[in-house]
Image: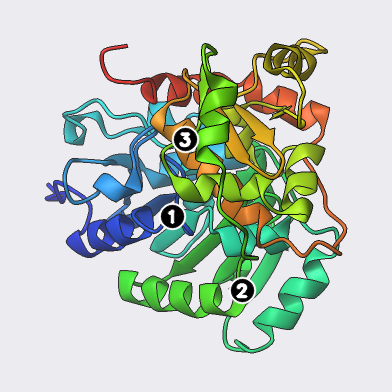
Amino acid sequence: MVQHQASAPAALKELSARLGTDITRTQGAGGNTSCKVDGTMWVKASGTWLAQALDREIFVPVEVAALTAALAAGDPRADKATDFVVHEMNPHGLRPSIETSVHAVLPQPVVAHFHCVNTIAHAVRGDADREVARRMSGLPRLKWEMIPYRRPGLPLALEIARVAPERPDVLILRNHGIVVSGDSVEEVDQRIEAVTAALAVEPRGTGEPDLEGLSTLARGSAYRPPNDPASHAVALDEAALRIALAGPLYPDHVIFLGGRLGLLDEGADLDRSIRSAMEGGHPPPGMILVPGRGVLVSNTLTEGGLAMARCLAEVALRVDPTAPIDYLGAAQVYELTHWEAEQYRRELDRPSGA
Ligand SMILES: [Zn+2]
């Protein structure tokens, strides 16, 4: 009988924790890593945070051959991948990441996928192909591919499966993030450093938020200024504000902050701003932008939502204001918000005790 390893390799846990604690690479429960060992793929569990990789079990074992066969056969069970978990090695009953199929279709043993804000700043551009090619030209030994936007999970995995046989080292996912693969954790680690350096953008600087003014505006409402001072920057830069208000740029923004943000112009009424953001059947906005002052977040926002508020500032301050931008459209927002696997992930992100 084959002796299976009882957990993911220590090196993968260490890399995961590092990726998970860098806000420019991972925000909240986003991002996932995996390692294939003797036919078992250890992949991050849904709703867990990479940042916790050294503190608790965040990896769940999946039978990779059975999962890839299901993917190839168009079996819908491949989307959630829960039917392919090696239950006797999963004592905590963890559910695999919603992006497990993405890891499974890649032949390389080690795969890291994360929501690098520098990558996203290019990947939302209409001219992403040209801009990324220009930056990656300095790394001729890395084979990379641009992947068009698809809903995370099965549709994205099927898109990646088209290029997977060529064993690309790096995948740039339009309006989403990056995937870095390799033969070892060390190789993936080195590639991550090289690629993120090549794609790095200095965020535009801004003035200070008006925390006192924001608190006054929010008094008596279900909103408040977030504690993280850097989250306010999105409303302190004209271009970032315009980009943020024009539409959602990537999936986790939709999942944790909703499809539409609020806007509170100088002298306007907060209740009216909230109602206006809800027009067309939208839920109350997770975040309200107050131009020149900062942002307000809903009191119902979870840790994941607060992390996405910060992420928006990090991305929007890095996007070239002159570049054409592709946003997620209504159909794409709908498919993200009506997907059972994402509802489960949001559920896990509720405050403890809730
Ligand atoms: Zn992702």
Residue neighbourhood size for the residue with mark 1, other residues' Cα within 10 Å, grouped as few (<14), some (14–19), many (≥20): some
Q: Nearer the viewer, mark 2 or mark 1?
A: 1
Q: Nearer the viewer, mark 3 or mark 1?
A: 3
Q: CA distance from mark 2 to mark 1?
A: 16 Å
Can residue 124 be spotted in the picture?
yes
Q: Earlier in the sequence, mark 2 or mark 3?
A: 2
The residue identified by callout 2 is: 199
Can residue 73 be spotted in the picture?
no
Residue at (69%, 45%) from the top-left corner? Answer: 292
Q: Element under label 1?
A: loop
Amino acid at circle 1:
Ile
Q: Earlier in the sequence, mark 3 or mark 1?
A: 1
Left or right of 147 on screen, residue 217: left
The residue identified by callout 3 is: 226
**Image coordinates for residue 21, horizontal then vertical, percent:** 34, 55
Amino acid at circle 3:
Pro
Amino acid at circle 2:
Leu
Left or right of 354 on screen, residue 284: right
**Image coordinates for residue 149, horizontal then vertical, percent:** 73, 47
**Image coordinates for residue 147, horizontal then vertical, percent:** 71, 57
The residue identified by callout 1 is: 23
Left or right of 262 on screen, residue 79: left
